[in-house]
């Protein structure tokens, strides 16, 4: 009988330890799920969920499953901070994740120091976020400066000199244009700026801006209009014959499926656009398998935000695995070790720069073109900008 | 060349003004006649865009028929909303109106997201407007001219209705003295239902008419109602002519302002609003609040 009692105690101890090991690793994701940009938040949360399910299907991380909790930050910094605090204090999440809006990312970032909870950003693109050199903030997608530098590298090869800008009037639009034109002038000192237009972010009428731009007779136009702004602008500009007059229209966020999908067959052809990830590139086993899995699960093609969130989740899991811990300091060291964490995402190799925790990756650009196979325009004559062309200097030191 | 360009810019300004007028006029009408601050106005504008998309099944050929159906649906929805939600709160303090119409805005946004999804929906240009007109050698989308005509028609019909019909006289009288109107035997509740239904139908028609140039999204309601409020605050809340004046001022200010100060495009409407609020807080064509005796 004594033996039986000991067996009982042993079973209890082992059981408790097992239950402890099965406690999920909680990841609180902030995405925009309402308002005009809900489409981006939806694809981001779908990509993250797909990665979580893949990781859990193979036994989780450190023997523990991942649990994703998605909340709506409305793209509003105050709401984002409130929800992030709630996730940390009430839901007891181990990590913060996602974030679409740059202003939300900047508002939430200080919480990572306050609570020692790491944040993995997969969309918000202001260069400032990683230039703050915070120890527990990581960005696994490329940022707006890398996009602008890639655009400048391409623009420098185009046979045009007269450039103009039309961008949304807030930090993202202003900083992107500054980065683009400064870089382009380094590469091609002979270019000149003939017009700058700054419609309000969320504008629905671009007619006056289009005619004012056309009057300046630019040969190339740089634009960071995104989401519905780009959808509406492209349709109105096309009606004015804008794209017949301007030889090159360059937009680093114009190939988002959230833009090309709604434009459908109305999308102008020959726009030089990018989108951080394009589901038809690269033509590898890895990417095709991801696209197929995503389509099977959600019945749509993965947008860039879906792939970035998917890859970000896998990178976070890798870092936890490598750290053998969910503690912020151990995870930070795992991200920084060996010259920075690398991950072979569907879009190709991502490498995190240890100094500023910014991931660098090759970028795909191309000219819009309609084909019978897809109900929206796809990228033709693809141009690949290697990661090395987008590596800007950082102030951060580790 | 230069003159031609300024003419073109004038037209783009008027086109923008027309979109703003269609957006704002119903809001002003409802406030003027009923004293209701309708925060959900932008939601009915959004609903009009989505209903056109649904009625025409996303096909350009179904545009005209769809537009008529949206107008009819707007009247029915407006009448129902007034009877079910607005009528019980007429005699309550104004905070109740704001809470109620704001709740409607949130509910309608989620309903539309539930029915149509979160992605942007765009609608092709109706075949009649497929080709641009040429203004002094520059292509100009003919749909903008249609919008300018539509806005002018709506303004004219409203003027004729308010000035030349018995119902219009009652609506104007209701803005002055509701009790007196009731004492004279006018069925004021029915009058209110009619005005609200008309205002909502105007919002829905506006949303539908702008869809071929824009794109529908569940979040467009909030942006629309903010723009509408800017227009009516400048023009005078409650005044149909104020809405027209406010829209034209903003449209022209943007079209010509960006030629002089391209950096300031976003500031123009707000600067104009601030100026009007400083000099005439009740709006350009609004009436200063009367002292109640």
Image (cartoon, rainbow, N blue to C red):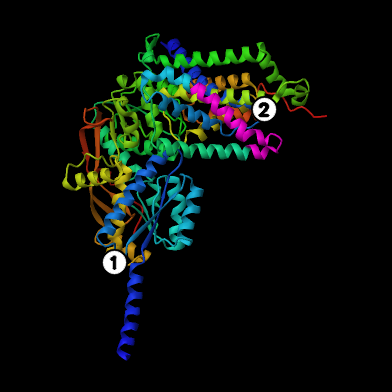
Q: Which residue is mark 1?
A: A63
The x and y percentages for residue A1 are 32, 90
Q: Is residue A172 above or below residue A52?
A: above
Q: Assign the C terminus of chain A to one quadrant of the image.
A: bottom left
SS of the residue under disc 2: helix
Query: On the picture, is B34 further left or further right than A336?
Result: right
- Of badges 1 and 2, nearer the viewer stands 2
The x and y percentages for residue B136 are 40, 8
The x and y percentages for residue A264 are 31, 28
Query: On the picture, is A366 further left or further right than B250?
Result: left
Chain on which label 2 sits: B
Categorize mark 2 by other alpha carbons within 10 Å: few (<14), some (14-19), many (20+).
many
Q: Dividing the picture into quarters, in which one does residue A5 lie?
A: bottom left
Asked whether residue A388 appears in the rendered view, the answer is no
Secondary structure character of the magenta stretch overall: helix
SS of the residue under disc 1: loop
Q: Is residue B239 above or below residue B218?
A: above
| Residue at (48% x, 61% y) in the render | A90
Q: Dividing the picture into quarters, in which one does residue A194 lie?
A: top left
Distance between mark 1 and mark 2 Cα atoms: 65 Å
* Residue A55 covered by magenta stretch: no
| Residue at (38% x, 14% y) in the render | B129
Q: Dividing the picture into quarters, in which one does residue B191 lie?
A: top right
The x and y percentages for residue A232 are 40, 28
Q: Which residue is mark 2?
A: B34
Which residue occupies the extreme top position in the image? B136
Q: Which mark is residue B215?
A: none
* Residue B92 covered by magenta stretch: yes
In the image, A312 versus B225, the foreground residue is B225
Magenta span covers which residues?
B70-97
Categorize mark 1 by other alpha carbons within 10 Å: few (<14), some (14-19), many (20+).
some
Q: Do the numbered discs 1 and 2 sit on residues whose CB atoms are within 8 Å? A: no
């Amino acid at each position: 009988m004594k033996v039986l009692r000991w067996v009982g105690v042993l079973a209890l101890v082992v059981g408790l330890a097992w239950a402890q090991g099965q406690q999920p690793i909680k990841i609180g994701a902030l995405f925009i799920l309402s308002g005009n940009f809900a489409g981006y938040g939806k694809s981001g949360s779908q990509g993250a969920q797909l990665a979580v399910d893949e990781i859990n299907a193979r036994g989780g991380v450190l023997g523990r499953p991942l649990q994703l909790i998605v909340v709506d930050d409305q793209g509003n910094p105050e709401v984002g901070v409130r929800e992030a605090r709630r996730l940390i204090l009430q839901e007891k999440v181990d990590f913060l994740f996602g974030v679409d809006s740059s202003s939300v990312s900047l508002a939430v970032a200080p919480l990572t120091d306050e609570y020692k909870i790491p944040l993995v950003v997969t969309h918000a693109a202001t260069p400032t976020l990683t230039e703050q050199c915070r120890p527990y903030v990581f960005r696994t997608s490329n940022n707006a400066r890398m996009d602008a530098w890639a655009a400048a590298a391409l623009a420098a090869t185009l046979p045009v000199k007269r450039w103009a800008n039309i961008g949304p009037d807030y930090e993202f639009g202003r900083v992107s244009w500054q980065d683009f034109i400064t870089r382009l002038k380094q590469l091609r000192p002979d270019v000149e700026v003939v017009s700058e237009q700054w419609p309000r972010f969320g504008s629905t009428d671009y007619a006056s801006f289009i005619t004012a731009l056309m009057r300046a007779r630019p040969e190339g136009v740089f634009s960071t209009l995104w989401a519905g702004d780009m959808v509406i602008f492209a349709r109105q500009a096309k009606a004015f014959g804008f794209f017949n007059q301007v030889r090159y229209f360059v937009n680093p966020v114009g190939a988002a499926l959230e833009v090309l999908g709604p434009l459908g067959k109305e999308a102008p052809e020959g726009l030089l656009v990018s989108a951080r990830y394009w589901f038809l590139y690269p033509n590898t086993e890895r990417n095709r398998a991801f696209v197929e899995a995503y389509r099977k699960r959600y019945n749509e093609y993965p947008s860039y935000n879906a792939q970035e969130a998917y890859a970000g989740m896998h990178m976070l899991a890798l870092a936890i695995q490598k750290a053998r811990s969910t503690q912020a300091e151990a995870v930070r060291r795992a991200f920084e070790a060996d010259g920075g964490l690398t991950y072979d995402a569907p879009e190709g190799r991502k490498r995190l720069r240890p100094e500023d925790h910014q991931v660098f990756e090759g970028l795909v650009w191309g000219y819009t073109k309609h084909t019978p196979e897809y109900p929206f325009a796809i990228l033709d004559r693809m141009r690949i900008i290697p990661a090395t062309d987008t590596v800007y200097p950082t102030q951060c030191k580790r | 060349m230069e003159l031609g360009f300024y003419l073109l810019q004038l037209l783009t300004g008027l086109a923008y003004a027309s979109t703003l007028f269609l957006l704002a006029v119903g809001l002003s009408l409802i406030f003027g006649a009923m004293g209701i601050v309708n925060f959900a106005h932008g939601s009915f504008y959004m609903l009009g865009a989505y209903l056109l998309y649904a009625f025409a099944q996303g096909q350009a050929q179904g545009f005209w028929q769809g537009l008529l159906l949206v107008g009819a649906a707007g009247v029915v929805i407006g009448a129902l909303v007034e009877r079910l939600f607005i009528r019980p709160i007429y005699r309550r303090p104004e905070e109740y109106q704001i809470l109620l119409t704001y709740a409607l805005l949130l509910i309608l946004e989620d309903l539309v997201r539930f029915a149509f999804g979160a992605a942007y929906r765009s609608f092709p240009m109706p075949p009649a407007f497929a080709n641009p007109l040429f203004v002094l050698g520059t292509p100009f989308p003919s749909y903008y001219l249609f919008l300018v005509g539509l806005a002018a028609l709506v303004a004219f019909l409203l003027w004729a209705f308010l000035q030349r019909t018995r119902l219009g006289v009652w609506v104007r009288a209701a803005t002055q003295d509701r009790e007196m109107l009731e004492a004279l035997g006018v069925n004021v509740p029915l009058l209110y239902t009619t005005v609200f239904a008309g205002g909502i139908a105007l919002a829905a028609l506006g949303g539908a008419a702008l869809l071929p140039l824009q794109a529908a999204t569940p979040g467009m309601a909030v942006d629309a109602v903010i723009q509408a409020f800017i227009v009516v605050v400048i023009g005078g809340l409650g005044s149909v002519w104020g809405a027209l004046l406010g829209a034209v001022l903003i449209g022209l200010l943007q079209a010509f302002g960006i030629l002089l100060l391209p950096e300031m495009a976003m500031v123009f409407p707000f600067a104009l609003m601030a100026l009007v609020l400083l000099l005439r807080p009740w709006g350009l064509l609004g009436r200063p609040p009367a002292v109640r005796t």
